[in-house]
Amino acid sequence: MAKNFLKGLFFGSLAGGVYTLLKTPRSGEDNREILLDYLDDTTLLVDDVTKSMNDLKEAISTLSNEGKTLANEFTQEVAVSVEEFINQTEPRMRRIQEQAEKLSKDINELDKQVSPTE
């Protein structure tokens, strides 16, 4: 069945082509010239699309690489900032802790002084 279909398709295409060539209002030379112009235009368009696709791929690759670089730099800068923050706040936190301990000790002593001893 597929063989018959392919034969029919081939002979139908051949008959259609012959009919078109016989009934066309233009000469064969004009038809060839129009076909060549069409093929040239199509080739140029395909080349433009191919070039645009390659440019797009390159731009995506560049953007990806720059994004990775920026992300790494940002991560390093954040790590440095966090480390600086910790170094700056550590002495303050120690003083706050010491003051809290002293305050707690003073409250306990005051509580002992105020409470009547039994």
Image (tube, helix red, strand yellow):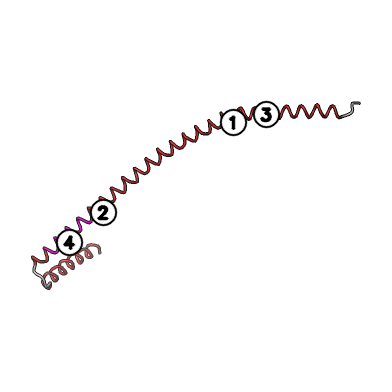
Judged left or right of residue 60, residue 4 is left
Q: Is residue 25 magenta?
A: no
Identity of the amino acid at label 3? Gln
Q: Which residue is mark 2?
A: 49
Q: Residues within 10 Å of mark 4 (few under 14, many from 20)?
A: few
Q: Position of residue 37 (x, y in %)?
A: 15, 61
Q: Secondary structure at mark 4?
A: helix
From the viewer's side, name the closer residue of 118 and 23. 118
Task: Tell me the magenta residue range.
Answer: 33-45
The residues bearing labels 4 and 3 have C-alpha atoms spaced at a distance of: 85 Å
Judged left or right of residue 29, residue 115 is right
Q: Earlier in the sequence, mark 3 or mark 1?
A: 1
Identity of the amino acid at label 2? Val
Q: Earlier in the sequence, mark 2 or mark 4?
A: 4
Q: Which residue is mark 4?
A: 38
Residue at (72% x, 27% y) in the render: 101
Q: Earlier in the sequence, mark 1 or mark 2?
A: 2
* Numbered label attached to residue 89: 1
